[in-house]
Image (cartoon, rainbow, N blue to C red):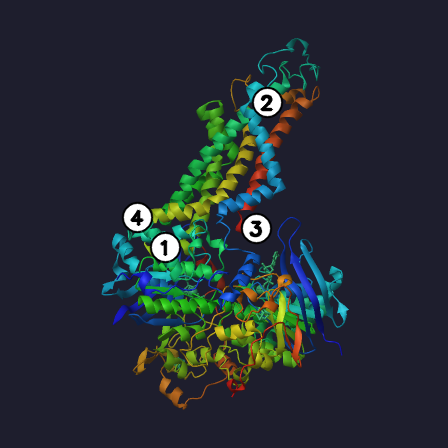
């Protein structure tokens, strides 16, 4: 059963310029047509390079950013169409965990009022006493003691802050939790604590997780299904085991071969598939297959002009590549990174067609579109 | 032959009179031989960056107490006047940082920044320097270097900036290159590019590399020798195969057990180290790792454990190390 | 779906030192002893940011000195009628004033008299009242109006923000003195018009400052988290965004008190102040004294010193407040 069905979701940020009247001179296509389902009680992992649109996608699903197009069906209701009080009420069922545990907690509030906030917003409990008991229960569930109640966020370590963030999310009894890089700001030795905690909470509360992370090993460990994003679109989706056993998309392959493993023998044996260059600008994505500027398997014509659909190759495995079968069978051979770079003629910089300054300006003090609290 | 870099009993304490002292580095000892790649691994706050700044002589002069010794080719660096240090930096040793943007001058094109280094340290003429700069950028894999020379740092991507910094660091073929988390801010695919580049450059130029990172995976593929730091001290030091195969300190073992691996079967639970790096005691009171250690015994408290040789070049600072891991893991 | 947490959730072992630590009980008290040594014990009571800031403020000698000056100033102003040895309006020694001689320090008149034979000391003491009153009232008026505009712009954003900020920009582009003279001409020559004039020049500063920091805070993670929890917009703005945005405004208000005192004196000096010149005011005293600079320069010197000391007190206090409230400086 699917808790969430995302269909054709797009988020385009306008790039504005001008002194008095902001002219829109283009769009950053942060998320550009994404379809996927979140199964009830399961974890969906989303990986991809920085700037490929993972966080934007996660926030658009929660309606923290206004989607440009598409629908997010949450338990039968299209979240993308909700307004005002209806939307506010709906928020109770979906929560978020943030990357930076310190900046996601109001520094001026103590832990008790941070966690009570959601309970108050939805009138979940009547009396102060009840809610105090509930908060202590929540804190214990995430591994903190009641002594934390009167203390302030800056007095905790990173891992403890992340636990507080998790307790805050749990306070409103959500069904869906979107965790945006939940462990990447934590120390290595503490990451495992939080990963284990999330897994335990999922089991006991039957939560559905969307975990966004750039660390493939963590995502693989925690997810049932993994989606790989590149420049605002999904390029591959498969069950965690399948994906890591047989990555089919060239991007996924190189991504996996790039992850360092703490084992000298593996490191010495491994063949890295090095990609040339950087992520192109989402303001001006390449034509055809968006990966063709860096793809070692790229074939002439079709890859440059025709956009590959995310198609079902096996029951639990979807790929967006024209030549997935041939690549798997080994009938197309990859080129080296240098050859690919030479092939492309010009070097493909991170800034793509637009001047870097445009992007800097675009990101600077642009409010999120029609955000309105 | 004396090693290229010797750090002996280095301690760095922050804090002016009246404020609370922070002991960032606490009796750190390690060496780097000529052409060797040495890793310095540890969690954030364990003193990695401060160590590298101390070696480069870049710590602020006020409010910081440095003791111990840092020797480059037998010559002590700690007492040197700033002018001589400045000459050494760039020519004998160079450094690259985690955040390449903030270590480049934002209003000067990178070409000028690279040629400046060449003109100052290698005394090249402007023309020759420009040619050399193009060569350098080409060597670190920046495509179309002639055009790139005119661009400003903000026009380059993170990976390109890091390459530009590496080019500047290598401009004078230093004997020692310090890299403080050079790939932490980058994506995995870009990280792979930079690591390959560093590996190739080190082999090609014979430069010794001190690689500072929190990522055990990065160290496993790159370093000849690894020093694991905890709370400002080396707690275990060994050749990389020895360390990853037979690491015996409970902290090293704990770190390895707590990170999920891409190549191991899924479903195995992670075994975290409890508590956080904040839960530590001063080394003078015993083992700093004791509050988090499963192996803690009476001997761990009261007196700090010494760094002792366990076998060959493997050094360990622990009273009750974990037993050697069975060899079948390697098969 | 409502899940009884107590039943369905096991209790995660607490991650604090000394709690749930140690595999067996025998080690427990030893570890407790260790935990007691750790830098951040779990037992100390929570310290809010504000209290933490005040702690640091109290330890800063500059802040203490600034506060001391401010206290003296306020004390003198409040108790001026009792502190002043003589009546400030009585022309005691008018008979002895000559065009080329003003009586200096003498018994009963420690600082001498002014050009009309009034006691200089008493006039200085009572003058503090005008300065304090104008400073506080004008800053309060500027602060209130500026914050209202700032909240409007920073809280609502979008089109409201654009309109409000254009209005504020226009206010900012009118030279302060021109504005002050216009206001004084419109409202007449009295202290109130000076207050309004100074307040009007301060409004855009406060508005811009608050709006800027509110916009930044509005997109911060914790505001997003509250939105995600379904907390109503007004509660987010007044409960989270505003409290986290006011520190720069508070600092600016303290500094503005200093400028307001100087501006009040300047406007009185230019004759825009109280039409009744017998009421002592530092600015007008300075203006009166300038005709007698050759005869008795001290008469210009005394009010100057008073203005400088009062302004200095607020400036020092404001600057150290800025330091104390800056999270960068927190331990
Ligand atoms: N408010 C905004 N205005 C304009 N562009 C934006 C905005 N937010 C995000 N973007 C752009 O959208 C793209 C996707 O951003 P997003 O934050 O979703 O990436 P991400 O995959 O989460 O990256 P990371 O791994 O760094 O968190 C980026 O190019 C980013 O610059
Ligand atoms: N300028 C400074 N003033 C005070 N303390 C500092 C300063 N720089 C670093 N420290 C402290 O020194 C310790 C080690 O820091 P650092 O070497 O940066 O850690 P890392 O291992 O993450 O690089 C930390 O506790 C840090 O807070
Ligand atoms: S469609 Fe072509 S360019 Fe795209 S991934 Fe497949 S082979 Fe590479
Ligand atoms: S010395 Fe003792 S406390 Fe420290 S790591 Fe070894 S066993 Fe653990
Ligand atoms: Mg993100
Ligand atoms: Mg560091």
Q: Label 2 neighbourhood size at 10 Å, few (<14), some (14-19), many (20+)?
A: many
Residue shown at 36% from the left, 73% from the top: A234
Subunit bearing disc 2: C
User: Residue B30: percent from the left, percent from the top?
Assistant: 67, 72
Helix, strand or loop status at disc 4: loop
Q: What's the mark number on residue C329? A: 3
Could you tell me if the residues under marks 1 and 3 are in contact, i.e. CB atoms within 8 Å? no
Q: Does the residue labelled 4 lie within 8 Å of ligand 5?
A: no
Q: What's the mark number on residue C125? A: 2
* Camera-nearest residue between C22 and A177: C22
Could you tell me if the residues under marks 2 and 1 are in contact, i.e. CB atoms within 8 Å? no
C-alpha separation, residue under disc 4 versus residue under disc 3:
40 Å
C-alpha separation, residue under disc 4 versus residue under disc 1:
12 Å
Q: Label 1 neighbourhood size at 10 Å, few (<14), some (14-19), many (20+)?
A: many
Q: Which numbered disc flags the more N-terminal residue, 2 or 3? A: 2
Residue that carries the numbered disc 1 in the rendered image: A135
| Front: mark 2 or 1 | 1
Q: Which residue lies furthest to the front in this view?
A: C26
User: Residue C37: percent from the left, percent from the top?
Assistant: 57, 58
Helix, strand or loop status at disc 3: helix
C-alpha separation, residue under disc 1 versus residue under disc 3:
32 Å
Helix, strand or loop status at disc 1: helix
Q: Is residue A330 above or below residue B218?
A: below
C-alpha separation, residue under disc 2 versus residue under disc 4:
57 Å
Same chain shared by disc 4 and disc 3: no
Helix, strand or loop status at disc 2: helix
Residue that carries the numbered disc 4 in the rendered image: A127
């Amino acid at each position: 059963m699917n808790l969430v069905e995302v269909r054709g979701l797009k988020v385009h940020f306008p790039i504005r310029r001008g002194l008095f009247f902001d002219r829109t001179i283009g769009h950053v296509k942060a998320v550009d047509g994404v379809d996927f389902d979140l199964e009830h009680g399961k974890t969906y992992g989303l990986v991809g390079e920085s700037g490929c649109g993972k966080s934007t996608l996660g926030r658009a699903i929660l309606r923290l950013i206004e989607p440009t197009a598409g629908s997010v069906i949450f338990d039968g209701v299209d979240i993308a169409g909700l307004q005002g009080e209806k939307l506010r009420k709906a928020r109770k069922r979906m929560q978020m965990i943030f990357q930076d545990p310190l900046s996601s907690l109001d520094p001026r509030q103590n832990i008790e009022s941070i966690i009570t906030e959601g309970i108050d917003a939805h009138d979940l409990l009547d009396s102060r006493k009840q809610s105090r008991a509930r908060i202590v229960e929540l804190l214990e569930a995430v591994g903190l003691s009641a002594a934390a109640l009167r203390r302030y966020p800056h007095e905790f370590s990173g891992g403890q802050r992340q636990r507080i963030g998790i307790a805050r999310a749990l306070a409103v009894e959500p069904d869906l939790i979107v965790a945006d890089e939940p462990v990447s700001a934590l120390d290595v030795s503490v990451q495992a604590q939080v990963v284990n905690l999330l897994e335990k909470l999922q089991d006991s509360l039957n939560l559905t997780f969307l975990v966004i992370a750039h660390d493939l090993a963590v995502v693989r460990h925690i997810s049932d299904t993994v989606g790989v994003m590149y420049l605002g679109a999904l390029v591959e989706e498969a069950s965690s085991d399948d994906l890591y056993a047989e990555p089919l998309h060239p991007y996924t392959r190189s991504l996996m071969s790039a992850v360092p493993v703490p084992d000298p023998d593996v490191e010495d044996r491994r063949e890295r598939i090095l990609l040339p260059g950087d992520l192109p600008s989402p303001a001006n994505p390449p034509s055809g297959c968006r990966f063709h500027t860096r793809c070692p398997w790229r074939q002439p014509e079709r890859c440059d002009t025709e956009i590959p659909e995310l198609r079902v190759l096996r029951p639990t495995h979807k790929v967006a590549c024209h030549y997935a079968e041939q690549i798997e069978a080994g009938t197309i051979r990859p080129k080296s990174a240098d050859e690919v770079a030479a092939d492309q003629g010009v070097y493909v910089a991170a800034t793509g067609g637009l001047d870097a300054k445009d992007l800097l300006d675009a990101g600077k003090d642009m409010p999120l579109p029609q955000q309105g609290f | 032959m004396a090693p290229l870099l010797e750090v002996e009993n280095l301690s760095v304490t922050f804090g002016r009179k009246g404020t609370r002292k922070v002991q960032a580095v606490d009796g750190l000892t390690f060496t780097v031989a000529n052409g060797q790649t040495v890793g310095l691994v540890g969690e954030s706050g364990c003193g990695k960056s401060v160590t590298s700044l101390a070696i480069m002589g870049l710590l602020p002069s006020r409010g910081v107490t440095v003791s111990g010794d840092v020797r480059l080719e037998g010559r002590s660096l700690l007492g040197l006047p700033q002018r001589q240090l400045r000459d050494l930096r760039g020519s004998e040793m160079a450094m690259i940082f985690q955040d390449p943007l903030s270590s480049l001058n934002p209003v000067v094109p990178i070409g000028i920044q690279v040629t400046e280094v060449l003109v100052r340290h290698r005394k090249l003429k402007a023309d020759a320097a420009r040619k050399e700069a193009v060569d350098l950028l080409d060597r670190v894999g920046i495509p179309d270097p002639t055009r790139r020379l005119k661009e400003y740092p903000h026009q380059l991507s993170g990976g390109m900036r890091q390459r530009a910094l590496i080019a500047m660091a290598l401009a004078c073929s230093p004997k020692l290159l310090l890299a403080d988390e050079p790939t932490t801010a980058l994506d995995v695919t870009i990280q792979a590019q930079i690591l390959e580049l560093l590996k190739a450059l080190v082999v090609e130029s014979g430069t010794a590399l001190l690689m500072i990172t929190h990522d055990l995976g990065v160290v496993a593929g790159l370093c000849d020798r690894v020093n694991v730091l905890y709370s400002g001290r080396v707690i275990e030091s060994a050749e990389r195969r020895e360390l990853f195969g037979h690491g015996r300190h409970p902290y090293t073992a704990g770190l390895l057990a707590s990170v999920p691996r891409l190549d191991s079967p899924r479903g195995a639970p992670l075994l975290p180290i409890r508590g956080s790096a904040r839960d530590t005691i001063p080394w003078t009171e015993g083992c700093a790792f004791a509050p988090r250690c499963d192996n803690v015994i009476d001997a761990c408290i009261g007196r700090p454990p010494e760094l002792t040789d366990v076998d060959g070049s493997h050094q360990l600072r622990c009273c009750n190390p974990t037993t050697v891991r069975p060899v079948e893991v390697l098969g | 779906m409502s899940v009884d947490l107590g039943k369905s959730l096991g209790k995660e072992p607490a991650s604090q030192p000394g709690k749930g630590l140690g595999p067996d009980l025998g080690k427990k008290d030893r570890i407790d002893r260790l935990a007691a040594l750790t830098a951040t014990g779990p037992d100390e009571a929570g310290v809010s940011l504000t209290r933490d800031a005040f702690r640091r403020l109290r330890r800063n000698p500059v802040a203490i000195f600034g506060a001391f000056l401010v206290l003296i100033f306020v004390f003198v102003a409040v108790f001026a009628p009792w502190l002043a040895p003589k009546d400030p309006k009585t022309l005691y020694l008018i008979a002895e004033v000559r065009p080329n001689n003003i009586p200096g320090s003498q018994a009963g008149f420690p600082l001498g008299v002014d050009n009309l034979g009034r006691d200089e000391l008493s006039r200085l003491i009572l003058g503090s009242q005008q300065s304090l009153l104008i400073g506080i009232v004008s800053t309060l008026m500027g602060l209130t109006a500026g914050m209202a505009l700032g909240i409007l712009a920073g809280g609502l954003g979008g089109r409201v923000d654009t309109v409000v900020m254009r209005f504020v920009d226009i206010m900012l582009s009118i030279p302060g003195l021109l504005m002050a003279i216009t206001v004084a001409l419109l409202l007449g020559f009295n202290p109130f018009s000076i207050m309004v004039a100074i307040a009007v020049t301060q409004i855009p500063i406060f508005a811009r400052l608050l709006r800027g920091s509110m916009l930044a805070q509005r997109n911060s993670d914790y505001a997003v988290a509250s939105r995600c929890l379904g907390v109503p917009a007004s509660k987010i703005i007044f409960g989270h965004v505003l409290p986290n945005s006011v520190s720069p405004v508070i600092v600016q208000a303290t500094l503005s008190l200093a400028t307001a005192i100087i501006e009040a004196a300047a406007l009185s000096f230019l004759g825009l102040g109280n039409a009744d010149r017998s009421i002592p005011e530092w600015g007008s005293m300075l203006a009166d004294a300038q005709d007698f600079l050759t005869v008795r320069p001290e008469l210009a010197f005394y009010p100057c010193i008073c203005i400088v000391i009062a302004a200095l007190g607020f400036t020092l206090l404001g600057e150290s407040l800025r330091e104390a409230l800056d999270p960068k400086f927190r331990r």
